[in-house]
């Protein structure tokens, strides 16, 4: 946070230092002139500089879905299914997940009173209060 504040003060100082003696007519014109004037110089372009290599396109992937075989180039590789096939795969996954959840429902969570009682009991056991000490 402190570095950001120093950076802002430095930018404001760079833009407002050495104000013209005749004054400023418009803030917009002054700011536009300063933004151009205070920009760092452009790096000289040399004949030796080459543009960065363009990234290679992703490979073509054969869709594993039903129907005739078709190829596609995915924006990102997540599997071997194209749009409609991927949606069908996801629908089947969630339908299976919901069926398993209905077949084996989770027990209902304890009520707040049960949770408070278990916390009190755990604290009593941890502190040794309410338990009989055994001689060893």
Image (cartoon, rainbow, N blue to C red):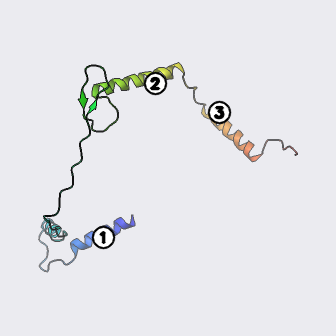
Do the numbered discs 2 and 3 sit on residues whose CB atoms are within 8 Å?
Answer: no
Query: Does 82 sit left or right of 109 as displayed?
Result: left
Q: Residue furthest right?
A: 135
Give the Cα separation between the discs numbered 2 and 1.
Answer: 56 Å
| Vertical side of 46 occupied by 101: above or below | above
Badge 3 is on which residue?
A: 114
Badge 2 is on which residue?
A: 97
| Vertical side of 57 occupied by 39: above or below | below
Q: Secondary structure at mark 1?
A: helix
Q: How many C-alpha atoms fall within 10 Å of the one at disc 2: few (<14), some, or many (≥20)? A: few
Residue 46 x/y as whole percent: 14, 66
Residue 66 x/y as whole percent: 30, 20
- Select label 1 or label 3 by which is in front: 1
Do the numbered discs 2 and 1 sit on residues whose CB atoms are within 8 Å?
Answer: no
**Nearer-N-terminus badge (2/1):** 1
Give the Cα separation between the discs numbered 1 and 3.
Answer: 57 Å
In the rendered image, which quarter contains the N terminus?
bottom left
**Nearer-N-terminus badge (2/3):** 2
Q: How many C-alpha atoms fall within 10 Å of the one at disc 3: few (<14), some, or many (≥20)? A: few
Q: Secondary structure at mark 3?
A: helix
Corner quadrant of residue 110? top right
Corner quadrant of residue 128? top right
| Vertical side of 79 occupied by 123: above or below | below
Residue 58 x/y as whole percent: 26, 40
- Select label 2 or label 1 by which is in front: 2
Q: How many C-alpha atoms fall within 10 Å of the one at disc 1: few (<14), some, or many (≥20)? A: few
**What mark, if any, has residue 124 been given in the picture?**
none
Corner quadrant of residue 17? bottom left
Badge 1 is on which residue?
A: 9
Query: Does 5 sit left or right of 36 as displayed?
Result: right
């Amino acid at each position: 946070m402190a570095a950001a504040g120093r950076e802002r003060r430095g930018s404001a100082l760079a833009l407002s230092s050495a104000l013209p003696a005749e004054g400023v007519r418009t803030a917009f014109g002054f700011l536009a002139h300063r933004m151009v004037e205070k920009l760092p110089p452009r790096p000289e372009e040399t004949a030796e500089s080459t543009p960065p290599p363009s990234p290679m396109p992703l490979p073509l992937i054969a869709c594993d879905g039903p129907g005739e075989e078709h190829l596609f180039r995915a924006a990102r590789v997540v599997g071997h299914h194209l749009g409609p096939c991927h949606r069908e795969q996801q629908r089947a996954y969630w339908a299976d997940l919901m069926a398993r959840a209905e077949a084996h429902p989770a027990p209902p969570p304890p009520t707040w009173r049960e949770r408070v009682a278990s916390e009190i009991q755990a604290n009593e056991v941890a502190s040794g209060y309410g338990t009989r000490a055994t001689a060893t």
